[in-house]
Image: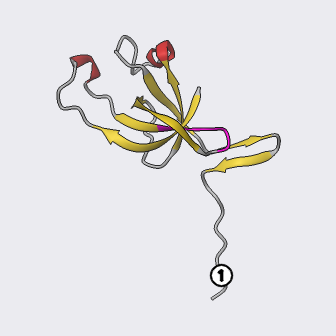
């Protein structure tokens, strides 16, 4: 599994019939410290990910092992939306950060 950030959508009005119904998203690779790294991938979305979200994705034959992509020509699949991760006890990413409000 790899970490990525949704940075765009891909629309293909003409495509093979077996790709009909798949939502395609453009994923930018990120490293374990949540910094963008080189490379993009177009991935089929299996979980309803949205713009700006950090996701888990898989490539290669693993991408064809979901119910929605079995026997389809898919090389990358988004299979999770990340809420948080940490490395050696230090939080590297948190989707829902608490917001402090000022007294009015």
Query: Where is 85 relative to 67, above or below?
Result: below
Left or right, residue 102 beside residue 26: right
Q: Quadrant of the C terminus?
A: bottom right
- Tag count: 1
The residue under the point 38% across, 19% down is: 74
The reply to whether the magenta stretch includes residue 54 is no
| Left or right relative to 56: residue 93 | right
Residue 46: % across, % down: 43, 30
Q: Is residue 102 above or below residue 87?
A: below
- Residue 37 location, quadrant: top right
Q: Residue furthest front?
A: 38
Q: Is residue 13 left or right of residue 27?
A: left
Name the quadrant containing residue 33: top right
For mark 1, give the secondary structure: loop
Q: Which residues are magenta?
A: 28-33
Residue 39 or 8: which is nearer the viewer? 39
Q: Is residue 52 left or right of residue 92?
A: left
For the rendered model, the colour scheme is secondary structure
* Residue at the farthest bottom position: 104
* Residue found 74% across the figure and 48% down from its top: 91
Q: Quadrant of the N terminus?
A: top right
Q: Position of residue 13 (x, y in %)?
A: 18, 32
User: Residue tagged by mark 1?
Assistant: 102
Across and down, in percent, residue 3 comes to: 57, 35
User: How far from the left and from the top, in percent, is residue 36?
Assistant: 55, 43
């Amino acid at each position: 599994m790899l970490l990525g950030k949704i940075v765009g959508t891909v629309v293909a009005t003409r495509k093979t019939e077996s790709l009909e119904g798949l939502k395609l998203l453009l994923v930018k690779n990120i490293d374990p410290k949540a910094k963008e790294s080189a490379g993009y991938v177009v991935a089929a979305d299996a979980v309803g990910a949205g713009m700006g979200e950090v996701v888990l994705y898989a490539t290669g034959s693993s991408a064809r092992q979901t119910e929605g992509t079995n026997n389809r020509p898919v090389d990358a699949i988004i299979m999770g939306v990340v809420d948080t991760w940490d490395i050696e006890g230090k939080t590297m990413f948190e989707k829902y950060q608490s917001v402090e409000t000022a007294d009015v």
